[in-house]
Amino acid sequence: MFQPAITGSGVFTPDQTVTNAELVQVFNAYAERFNADNAEAIAAGRVEAKQPSSTDFIRSASGIEQRHVMDKTGVLDPEVMHPILRERVNDEPGIMAEIALDACGKALAAAGRAAGEVDLVICAASNHERPYPAIAIEIQTLLGAGGFAFDMNVACSSATFGIQAAADMIRSGSVRCALVVSPEICSGHLEWRDRDCHFIFGDVCTAVVLERSGDAEGPHFRVLSTRCATQFSNNIRNNNGFLRRTRPGHMQDRRDMLFVQEGRKVFKEVLPLVSSHIAGHLADAGLPADRLKRLWLHQANKAMNDFIGRKVMGRVPAPEEQPNILQDYANTSSAGSIIAFSKFSDDFEPGETGLICSFGAGYSVGSVLLERA
């Protein structure tokens, strides 16, 4: 048996950002036009009028201030209101593989590894641009990695589930060095015309290198243990399942084919599920909560994270104990907790512990307990 460790991480961040003010301006322009076009039906009670959005509403509902996106031109066009992602021909890299190369390169550099030393690639993300061939195999080939590769989708928990899978294979000896990469182009499956969710998501890609602790070239985090759980729920759902929009007036006008959630139900049901999951993980590891230096939580909603932090710690965590990147990145699905880990882990001393936790549709929740080596 070998001790798995995270030896490097990397984040690709798109150059384009959309502020709350920009988002509100385009949404309100759309809502105003919709209400004017449907004035007679609204007056007759057959159609519900669109309510305007506001920056105060977005900030209080989520804690988000901006988001990075692959294309803001389409998002900020009231006639379009979704990203315009160029169609790729079959013999050129897909958009997910393209952004994955950047994040993987950074993670490999941090680990001091060459791509040829990798013998497992897991593409763990909430939406994939095609069912097959696997995005992970494309990434593997473009990197020049060896071994094998496969895709994984457990919605917002994909990255932590991917880490568990890679850690288990390293522990057993079936692989030596793995990449878990999460290219999340969440803007492609968000309904930007829905006031309740038009502000939620952003785009990003994260990657982590896992290998045997004994092979590590520098400072690293031992994976002490992992814990995953699922429980079926329809309260967060996406029936589309892929990124590409179809012709105008077809799929993009099917509200049920994009991201939908019952926010109040999610808040009520997920918070106790996640809090008890983390508590159980710590108890099984024999680690009191006050021994945790940091919680790297899924970045979905500030109020949710604040609640979980209080339940786990038994008090209000200090900002450095539970860092948020939500205000800058918005919800980036499975990548959120890994962004937080990548940006807020360099200050750990040997022996200090932290926990990565992600949660989302499924329901799913995954946690990874780490110790600085």
Image: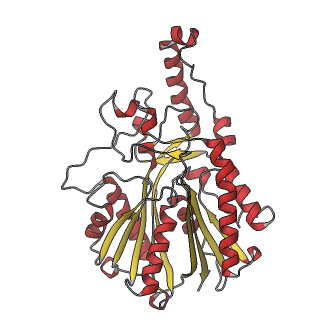
Q: Quick one: 149 or 142, which is closer to the camera? A: 149
Question: Image quadrant of residue 247?
Answer: top left
Q: Quick one: 301 or 258, which is closer to the camera? A: 258
Image quarter (top left, top right, bottom left or bottom right) of the C terminus: bottom right
The answer to whether residue 9 shows anywhere in this view is: no
Q: Would you say 61 lies left or right of 334 here?
A: right
Q: Residue at x 31, y 54 (%)?
A: 131
Give above or below for 14 relative to 346.
Answer: above
Give above or below for 200 relative to 146.
Answer: above
Q: Residue at x 47, y 78 (%)?
A: 167
Q: Would you say 67 lies left or right of 273 here?
A: left
- Where residue 254 appears, x then y in whole percent? 41, 32
- Where residue 224 appears, x then y in whole percent? 58, 82
Q: Residue at x 51, y 29 (%)?
A: 26
The answer to whether residue 290 shows anywhere in this view is: yes
Q: Residue furthest left?
A: 91
Give above or below for 238 relative to 317.
Answer: above
- Where residue 162 appears, x then y in whole percent? 46, 68
Give above or below for 300 relative to 22.
Answer: below
- Where residue 231 appears, x then y in whole percent? 56, 57
